[in-house]
Image (spheres, helix red, strand yellow):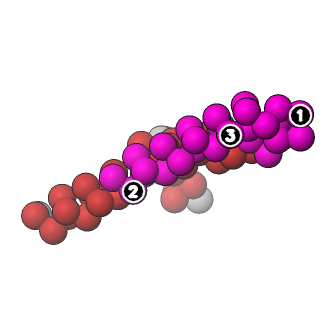
Amino acid sequence: MINAIKKFFKGKTEIERLEELRKDYLGKSFITSKSNRILSDTYVKKANEIEEKIKQRRSQMLVHSYLY
């Protein structure tokens, strides 16, 4: 119960927000792939760019945690 309350007030980390955004773009890509291939490819490209940002943030977190 207490953990649920802490989780509610904590908010989302930057990585969590980026992961949700990436998931949304991939979902949009799947939906538009049936009608507009160019738009679908654009969404996939944006999702891949976000994936790179996620990898960079995670590597920064690892390096940062090793320093402290």
Left or right, residue 58 beside residue 8: left
Tell me which label, 2 or 3, sits earlier in the chain: 3
Q: Is mark 3 on a helix, strand or loop?
A: helix
Q: Quadrant of residue 47 in the image?
A: top right
Image coordinates for residue 54, horizontal then vertical, percent = 42, 51
Label 3 – label 1 distance at C-alpha: 12 Å
Q: Quadrant of the N terminus?
A: bottom right
**How would you rate the neighbour count of disc 3 (Cα within 10 Å): few for under 14, some for 14-19, many for 20 or more?**
some
According to the picture, the residue beneath numbered tag 1 turns out to be 35
Left or right, residue 17 beside residue 41: left
Q: What residue type is disc 3 on?
A: Asp
Q: Residue 32: tell me if it is visible.
A: yes
Residue 33 highlighted magenta (yes or no): yes
Residue 26 highlighted magenta (yes or no): no
Label 1 – label 2 distance at C-alpha: 31 Å
Q: What residue type is disc 2 on?
A: Lys
User: In the depicted view, which residue is nearer to us: 67 or 39?
Assistant: 39
**How would you rate the neighbour count of disc 2 (Cα within 10 Å): few for under 14, some for 14-19, many for 20 or more?**
few
Label 2 – label 3 distance at C-alpha: 21 Å
| Main SS, magenta residues | helix
Label disc, if present, on residue 9 of the rendered structure? none
The residue lying at 19 percent from left, 62 percent from top is 63
According to the picture, the residue beneath numbered tag 2 turns out to be 55
Residue furthest right in the image: 34
Tell me which label, 3 or 1, sits earlier in the chain: 1
Image coordinates for residue 27, horizontal then vertical, percent = 74, 44
Q: Quadrant of residue 29 in the image?
A: top right
Q: What residue type is disc 1 on?
A: Ser
Left or right, residue 28 beside residue 63: right
Name the mark nearer the viewer: 1 or 2. 1
According to the picture, the residue beneath numbered tag 3 turns out to be 41
Which residues fall within the magenta stretch?
A: 28-56
